[in-house]
Image (tube, grey):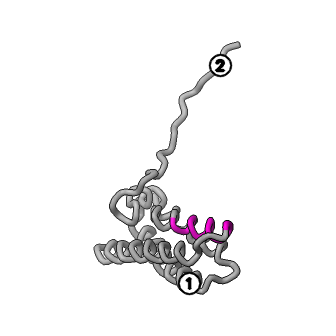
Amino acid sequence: MSLNLERLNWMPSPPLVPEDSAIDVQHLGRMTLGEAALEAEVLALFSAQSGELVTRLKAIPPDAAALAHTLKGSARAIGAFRVAEAALGVEAAMKNNGDIAGAIALLQQTVEEARATIGRMLNRS
């Protein structure tokens, strides 16, 4: 039996360890197809949404895991991988009766860093 192996064109994956920036601009560029206006729009939306979600999460509502999950997906979409990891930490803390307040504090810190980076990015354009 012979195997017919074809060459696969792999899509690059996001880095496992983010670069120094809170936003992976290469990933963001791929997700927005290099369109500057779309990039600015999704960054502004993420900045507003992430701030609102963290405010809601600080009250540790019953749907905290779902809110963190929403934030995780949005963060991954724009290349805010530190935020995504911190949101995953909130999800895990909720599911495992862990340090929810500590996980939310870390999430708040990463969101603040991402929002500051986004502010600088948007002010350049």
Residue numbers of the magenta segment: 86-96
Q: Is residue 108 left or right of residue 70?
A: left
Between residues 31 and 115, which one lies in front from this camera angle?
115
Q: Position of residue 88 (x, y in %)?
A: 57, 64
Q: Where in the figure is residue 62, as x and y percent of width and height?
A: 70, 81
Between circles 1 and 2, the one closer to the viewer is 1
Front in this rendered view, residue 64 or 10: 64
Magenta residues, dominant SS class: helix
Decide: is 22 above or below 27: below
Q: Position of residue 80 (x, y in %)?
A: 45, 65
Q: Determine which residue is flagged by label 2.
A: 3
On residue 58, which mark appears?
1
At x 44%, y 71%, the residue is: 110
Q: Report the residue at 71% width, 13% height from top.
A: 1
Q: Which mark is residue 96?
A: none
Residue 69 visible within the image: no
- Does the magenta run of residues contain 90? yes
Ranked by sequence position, the earlier of labels 1 and 2 is 2
Badge 1: residue crowd in 10 Å (few <14, some 14–19, many ≥20): some
| Secondary-structure class at tag 2 | loop
In the figure, 104 relative to 24: above or below?
below
The amino acid pointed to by label 2 is: Leu
Asked whether residue 21 is drawn in magenta, I would say: no
Q: Amino acid at mark 1?
A: Lys
Helix, strand or loop at disc 1? loop
Q: Where does the image place residue 59, in percent across and percent down from the top left?
A: 60, 86
Total count of labels: 2
- At a point 39% along the width and 73% down the height, the residue shown is 113
